[in-house]
Image (spheres, helix red, strand yellow):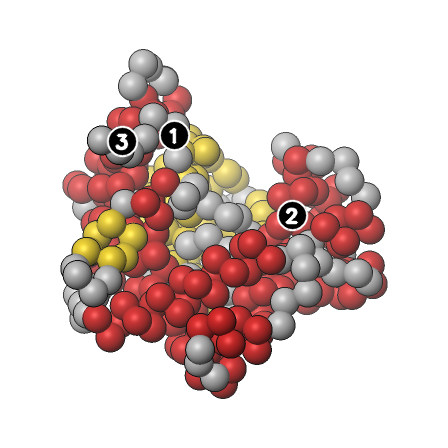
Amino acid sequence: MDYFDISASAVSGGCLQNHSGPYLFERHIHTSFEAYLITQGICSMNINGEDISCQKDDFIMILPNTVHSFEVAENEKCEFLHVHFEPELFAHILVKKTPEFSISLSDALSFHSNFYYKQISNVTLFNLMTSIVSVYQKPHSYSAISNNLYVAQLMLYVLEQVSKDEPLTLGVHIQNRYISYTLQYITEHFQEKILIPDIAKKLNISTRYLGKLFSQHMNLTLANYINIYRINQAIQLMSSTDMSLVDIALSIGLNDAQHFSRLFYKIINMPPGKYRKMIEKKL
């Protein structure tokens, strides 16, 4: 019998945070899901170019590889429950399985949400967020399993809200499978030169159709996503290693350091050297 292991925690961060303005966490990206529940005060976010105001009792979940910023204005305060969790575990949890297709919890959320999900909190969301933070802050023998199950419930709740108007049919699945393959291809080949026609050829569809489908589902072009993914990997390396910016550029598939700097500035709106100093201060 094969066992599905949920003993390693998917939660990489969980806390209650307080910030007084002026406070700004510049544009950044994560490979993880990120969830906020505002408990007091107000703040604002910019998520993939969209300005969003948040106030007490707002819940918001930001999807992986999404450019966003967080700000508390001068003379304002904001308190919030804050959770990060990695998507890998939930890529193995199926939310729909038929003889024709299956789809994972992580993929389903990505397909139905454009970068983020926001709603007014309720008892379900408050209890789940509070439980995740509490278990993360005070771990016990089975805390990893407990938190994985809480996160799965949280993701399922959001999925139920966003998928009401678009059920997971075979037609939807076939298109989603193209997107899933493309996302996986980028994950496995971002250190190399990526040619979009090569991806389309492996899927036996046209480059134009793949580009159109990707833009419809992800709300940004495939080329832009590849660039954002690479810059996300660069930020991870800035945070976790002492590699030079030149070596980081090479490790994410960019042979030109100047190209890396231009691309980084275009996505993050800050030179990579300045951004590295900023995150070093916050670590």
- Mark 2 Cα shell of 10 Å, populated few (<14), some (14-19), many (≥20): many
Q: Do the residues under discs 1 and 2 have CB atoms within 8 angstroms?
A: no
Is 261 situated left or right of 167 in this image? Answer: right
Name the foreground residue: 129 vs 86: 86
Q: Distance between the residues labelled 1 and 2?
A: 23 Å
Is 5 situated left or right of 229 in this image? Answer: left
Q: Which residue is under mark 2?
A: 235
Q: Which residue is under mark 3?
A: 3
Name the foreground residue: 66 vs 4: 4
Of tags 2 and 3, which is closer to the observer?
A: 3
Q: Quadrant of residue 262?
A: bottom right
Amino acid found under the numbered disc labelled 3: Tyr
Determine the residue positioned at 70% across, 42% down: 238
**Label 1's element?**
loop
Does residue 267 appear anywhere in the picture? yes
133 vs 194: above or below: above
